[in-house]
Amino acid sequence: MVRLLAVVAVVLGTALAGPLPTARASVTLTRVSGFGSNPGALTMYVYRPAALPAHPPVVVALHGCTQSAQVYADNSGLPQLADQDGFLLVLAETTTANNANTCFNWFQSTDNRRDQGEALSVRQMVGQAVTAYGADPRRVYVTGLSAGGAMTSVMLATYPDVFTAGAVVAGLPYDCTKDNSPYLCMNPGVDLTPDAWAQRVRDAAPSYQGPWPRAAIWYGDQDTTVAPRNATELRDQWTALHGLSQTPTRTTTIGSDATRQDQYLAADGTVAVEVDRVPGIGHGTPVDPGTGPEQCGATGAPYFPDSLCSSRWIARFFGLDTTDPGGSDPGDGGTAACWTASNYAQVQVGRATTSGGYTYAVGSHQNMGLYNTFVTHTLKESPTGYYTLADGGCP
C-alpha cells in the first residue's frame, strides 16, 4: 500500500507539474521552527506585515505541486493583501522527501485525518501563530491551489473548530479518495449526492456540532488537470453541510474578465458558500498583475494565469478586505458601526448568537468565546446585520 501511494504521488505530481519556476524571490519570508511535533514533516514560513495590528487574523496558504512557499508568496498576491488588510500570512511547505513533486498528500489517510500527519502539522502552525504573534484564534482562514486546494478541503473538514472559512482553488472535495483513486477524483471527477459528500466531512470531526466553516470554490473553466466538475461536487458538499439548496441565492459577474460568482446565503444573509468560475483559463491561481486597487499577483511561475486578482476576492470573502466599501459581504454597501459589550449583551440585542455555551457573531459566525457577562468584544457592523470582530480597532 505504501509503495502504491508513492507511485500515485509521482504520477499525480507529474500531472500537475510544469517547468520549474525561475522567478527571482521578492517577498521576504521568515522560517519558523519548533512549532510542534510536526508529524507531517512540513516547513512553516510567515510573512508579517510591518504594520500588523494587535491580535491580527491569520491566513494559511498552501502551495500547489512543483511549487514552494516562496513561489506562492511571490506570485499569488497574498503578501500585498496582508500589508493592505493587516493579516498574518502563514505559508506551509512540503518537500520532495514527502512527495516527489512537492504535492501535499491530500489523498493519503495518514495525512488527511484529524490529529495526524500533514493535517496536524498545519494545525500546529496555526497554534504557533496564535502563541508567538498574538494572532486571533477566532479569525483563522485557509486557502490553497491544486494539491494545496485539496489540502484546504482537508483542513476545513478535519478542523472546523479552528478555521472560520476557506477558499479552495482548483482543488477537490474532502475524502474523495476514500473509495476512489486520485486520478478519478481529479478527472473526470466523482459524482456523489450532496448528503453523501457532507457526511464525509461530518465523519472527519464527529464530535463537532458547528457552525461549519464558510467555503469559497475557485475554478478555471478550461482546467484539464482537475476537472471543473469538482467545483460542483465541492459546492454540493458545503451547501449540504450548511443545510442549503444547491441553487444559488444570487449570481453575478465580478472582475474584468466576467468571472461568474454564485453565492449561497444562509438565513441570516451570510454568504456560506461561494463558487467562482473563471472563464478562459486552465489550472492555476488567477492573478492580475498591476497597481490598480483590484489588481494583485504576478505571472512569474507556472499556474498563475493572468485573469483577475482571485486573492483580493478571497480576502473579501473572508471579511478581511479593508478596501471593500461594502464591508465583509461583496455586493452590499453600508457604513460600519461599532458595538462594544459583553458576549451576553451582544446576544441579547441580536448581534450574536449562542450555541453549546459559546457565542458567535451574527453574519460572520466568528467564535467570540464563552457566553457570559465577563467576556467583552467589539463588533463591527458592515453591511447592516453582518458583524465581525473588531477588537483591534473599529474606525
Image (cartoon, grey):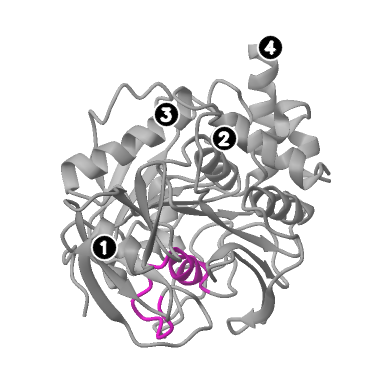
Position in image of residue 355 (x %, y %):
43, 47
Q: Earlier in the sequence, mark 2 or mark 4?
A: 4
Residue 321: mark in rendering:
none
Indicate the secondary structure of the residue bearing disc 4. Answer: loop
Mark 2 nearby-residue class (10 Å; few <14, some 14–19, many ≥20) = many
Mark 4 nearby-residue class (10 Å; few <14, some 14–19, many ≥20) = few
Residue sitting nearer the eye, 234 or 357 = 357
Which residue matches tag 3?
A: 120
Residue type of the residue flagged with mark 1: Ala
Indicate the secondary structure of the residue bearing disc 1. Answer: helix
Q: Which of marks 3 and 2 is nearer the N terminus?
A: 2
Which residue matches tag 1?
A: 345
Structural distance between the alpha carbons of marks 3 and 2: 21 Å
Looking at the rendered image, the disc whose residue lies closer to the viewer, 3 or 2, is: 3
Looking at the rendered image, the disc whose residue lies closer to the viewer, 1 or 2, is: 1
Which residue matches tag 4?
A: 1
Q: In this view, does 243 lie above or below 379?
A: above
Structural distance between the alpha carbons of marks 1 and 3: 36 Å
Which stretch did the figure color magenta? 309-327
Which residue matches tag 2?
A: 101
